[in-house]
Image: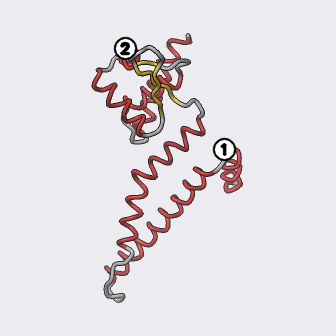
Amino acid sequence: MELAAAKLKFIEAWGKLGSEWGINRTMAQVHALLLISSVALTTEEIMEQLSISRGNANMTLRDLIGWGLIEKQHKAGERKEYFFADKDVWNIARQVAKERKKRELEPVLKILNELSNVTGDEKDPEFTTFKKSVADINKLANNADRTIETMLKAEESWFWSSILKVFK
């Protein structure tokens, strides 16, 4: 397989993977393009290579910057903005985990904590079932939160060696 075909295949695969993780397909494809690009790209270059509209490109680039997955830079004497992605996969994984924690896990934890304070008749099976289910889900969510926090603070080699110990 030649490099051009391999790049297209990677961009398409990263797009599918991103959509499986709940990330917009175009967002994942733009990220993939910037990941495999040896130089920072302009909005126009991204639009051309991925055949996307200016509006889609601008919105996607803004979202990727918001996620902390890409950065923008300016070159002296030029008005164009250039975009590049961090190539360190561990940094990418930590950034995605951090954003998903903030956007998905933290709101759920807040609601579960509120629901943990429900009051009712301890003899009512509906109440006890509800209270136990919420407590169990809350415990799982808090464990996930602690695991993500550990990942965010850890060095890659320590994190993976710790995870592998669990499976031995």
Residue at 39% from the left image edge and 60% from the top image edge: 108
Residue at 58% from the left image edge and 39% from the top image edge: 91
Residue at 38% from the left image edge and 58% from the top image edge: 107
Question: Which residue is the site of mark 2?
Answer: 48
Mark 1–mark 2 Cα distance, whole angstroms, equals: 36 Å
Q: In which quadrant will I find the N terminus?
A: top right
Q: In which quadrant will I find the C terminus?
A: bottom right
Camera-side residue of 89 and 128: 89
Q: Is residue 47 left or right of residue 40?
A: left
Q: Quarter of the image holding residue 54?
A: top left
Amino acid at pointer 1:
Glu
Tag 2 secondary structure: helix
Question: Which residue is the site of mark 1?
Answer: 156
Amino acid at pointer 2:
Glu
Residue at 51% from the left image edge and 12% from the top image edge: 4
Count neighbours of disc 2 (C-alpha within 10 A) and say few if under 14, some if 14 to 19, many if 20 or more.
few
Q: Is residue 54 left or right of residue 29?
A: left
Looking at the image, tell me whether mark 1 or mark 2 is earlier in sequence order. Answer: 2
